[in-house]
Amino acid sequence: MRFVIQCVSEASVAIDGEICGKIDKGFCVFAGIGEGDDETVADKLIDKMLKLRIFQDSEGKTNLNIEQVQGSILVISQFTLYADCRKGNRPSFVNAMQPDRANELYEYIVGELRKQNSNVQTGRFGSDMKVSLVNDGPFTIILDSDEILKKR
């Protein structure tokens, strides 16, 4: 599982010209789900993401997590995070989870986030989405379950 997390001052997602999710300060999260991922993996990445201290405190130090700044979360499904570009010029997506199961895990992720954050917005799984965001910082973090779950 891969989360690309961008601190934003605002973000939105539109489908067919209609805004379906919009947030102010918080995270815009692009979530890729790979073969072999499950709820246990999702729980670990969600926990790590929510605890990241990447918002500035009153002294300008990145010391605060999303809860402490009362930030919102926009979650966008993105199977292309599993693009394999090693061979040829057309990416392969064989490592991305099949859509039906990936959608179940995406909905699980959104549900778990909503238990801990009062403003979680989403795109629509499998749709052609137009995402707009103002990256704050810019500050972008990549969480990859292969790295997070690796024993040190």
Image (spheres, rainbow, N blue to C red):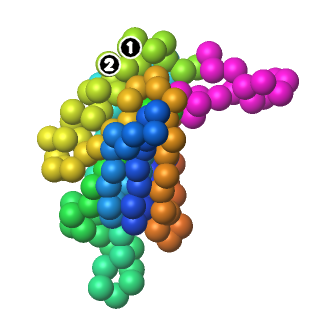
Magenta stretch, overall SS: loop
Residue ID at (21%, 50%): 119
83 in magenta: yes
Q: Give the camera-side residue of 34 and 102.
A: 102
Q: Residue at x 38, y 14 (%)?
A: 101
Q: Pointer 2 and pointer 1: residues touching (CB < 8 Å)?
A: yes
Residue 136 vs residue 149, the one in the foreground: 136
Residue at numbered disc 2: 104
| Kind of residue at disc 1 | Arg
* Residue 72 image point, x, y percent: 27, 55
Q: Secondary structure at mark 1?
A: helix
* Residue 98 in sight here: yes
Query: Which residue, given by chain and number where applicable, does mark 1 sit on?
Result: 101
Q: Which of these two is toward me, 73 or 12?
A: 12
**Image quarter in which the N terminus is found:** top left
Q: Which type of secondary structure does the marked residue at label 2 adopt?
A: helix
Q: Which residues are magenta?
A: 79-94
Distance of label 2 from label 1 (alpha carbons): 5 Å
Residue 93 vs 66, above or below: the answer is above
Q: Is residue 12 above or below residue 71?
A: above
Question: Quadrant location of residue 100?
Answer: top left
Residue occupying the far right of the picture: 88
